[in-house]
Image: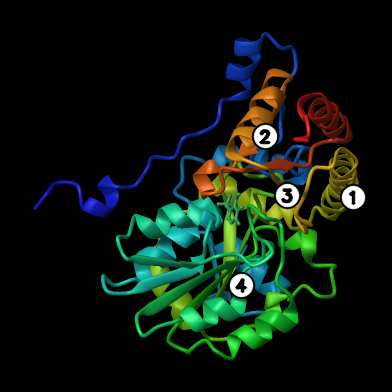
Amino acid sequence: MPLVPPYIESLRPYVAGLSADEVRKRYRLDRIDKLASNENPLGPSPRAVDAMRASLDKLNLYPSGGIDLRARLAELFELKIDNVIVGSGSEGIMANIIRTFLCDEDEVLTTENAFIGFQVLAKSRGVKYQTVPYRDWKYDLPALAAAINDNTKIIYLANPNNPTGTIFTRHEFDDFYKHVPERVLIILDEAYFEYAEDNPRYPDSMHYRYDNVITLRTFSKIYGLAGIRIGYGFAHESLIGNLLKVKLPFEPSTVAQAAGIAALTDKEFLHRSLELNARSLRMLMDACHDLGLSTVPSEANFAMLPLDSPEQAQYIFEELLKRGTIIRPLTAFGLPHCVRISTGTIEETERAVANLRQAYVPVK
Ligand SMILES: Cc1ncc(COP(=O)(O)O)c(C=O)c1O
């Protein structure tokens, strides 16, 4: 038996983009705008920062396992605490789902070019990873339903989706759900939920408290807390109960839990973030439209630009980098002809747009 299982050996390690400091040094720039990871350009929720500071003098003690945040979320969403889990980001919970529910012969089903974090987690488990292509850059739910087989154990759906920014509607999900056997677990990843929830066509998964649906949400995006690693999930108590057996007992950290509890009260920050995102996204989309660049309609805090070729995508990425705007090439997602740009502050987005204007030469 090899020391490293073949499915680990064949994984490609995650290659992080250049850090802002590396870009600054390499191109001798004074200012860098990082619009590559769908982070909140306003920084972290101020209430969360205060709460984190206040939690520091308790760090000699082990954390509670997230019980206080679970209780707060249960109260807020009118659920039992047994229906709520918290963890080190929604990816932390995703990792636990993979570890808890998958057996060797099980299969995972999702879209092609799904969120890279999920791709890595599922593939590292060594089970069969089955995909269906996008249709118009959206999950092709009828094709996914048709692809379910006797071994399908987990279906992963991100809504809004990363990297496309698209959503599937309430109606589309209802139709899809009818075709999913009860033994199949649906992960509904709602990392960008807050950006889409006001869209009447967006399915609020709190209305889908089916026994085989796990909803995942995060404090990393709208609350600006990606660096502290805190996310949460809702599901039937038997699913949560099994996840709790597998979860690291002291996850999340005391500081992360304090941040999450306080962030939930920071409505002012939430509204400011949403307002900025709407303005910034509109600026970005309008500018792309003026330039003749195609975009995918987005319900999140980023926009995906499908370009003519991988070379053109790489060229735009590098030209923006030289000018101080870091965006995300999507080769690792399996989309080498696409780039993704996160919304920034108005000034950051203005600079990104100006840099795009200089960099983009339409193919005649
Ligand atoms: C669709 C999706 N799910 C989950 C995550 C990860 O969130 P977290 O920071 O909570 O692990 C991201 C982050 O980019 C994402 O885009």
Judged by depth in the image, the label closer to the viewer, 1 or 3, is 1
Where residue 177 sits: x, y (%)? 59, 86
Element under disc 1: helix
Q: Determine crowd level at label 1: few under 14, some 14-19, many 20+ residues with C-alpha closer than 10 A.
A: few
The amino acid type of the residue labelled 3 equals Tyr
The residue under label 1 is 275
The residue at 68%/76% (across/down) is 205
Whether residue 99 sits left or right of residue 56 in the image: it is left
Mark 3 to mark 4: distance in Å? Answer: 30 Å
Judged by depth in the image, the label closer to the viewer, 3 or 4, is 4
Q: Determine crowd level at label 4: few under 14, some 14-19, many 20+ residues with C-alpha closer than 10 A.
A: some
The residue under label 2 is 327
Q: Tell me if label 2 and label 4 are in contact, CB under 8 Å.
A: no
Specify which label sits upstream in the sequence, 4 or 1. 4
Whether residue 249 is visible here, answered yes or no, is no
Judged by depth in the image, the label closer to the viewer, 2 or 1, is 2
Whether residue 226 is visible here, answered yes or no, is yes
Question: Which of the image's four quarters has the C terminus?
Answer: top right
Element under disc 4: loop
> In this rendering, is residue 248 above or below 315?
below
In this rendered view, identify the residue nearer to me: 155 or 226.
Answer: 155
Element under disc 2: loop
Per the rendering, the mark at residue 223 is 3
Mark 2 to mark 1: distance in Å? Answer: 22 Å
In this rendered view, identify the residue nearer to me: 121 or 167.
Answer: 167
- Dividing the picture into quadrants, the one containing residue 308 is top right
Mark 2 to mark 4: distance in Å? Answer: 27 Å
Specify which label sits upstream in the sequence, 2 or 3. 3
Per the rendering, the mark at residue 140 is 4
Query: Does any atom of ligand 1 lie closer than 8 Å to the CB of label 1?
Result: no
Specify which label sits upstream in the sequence, 3 or 4. 4
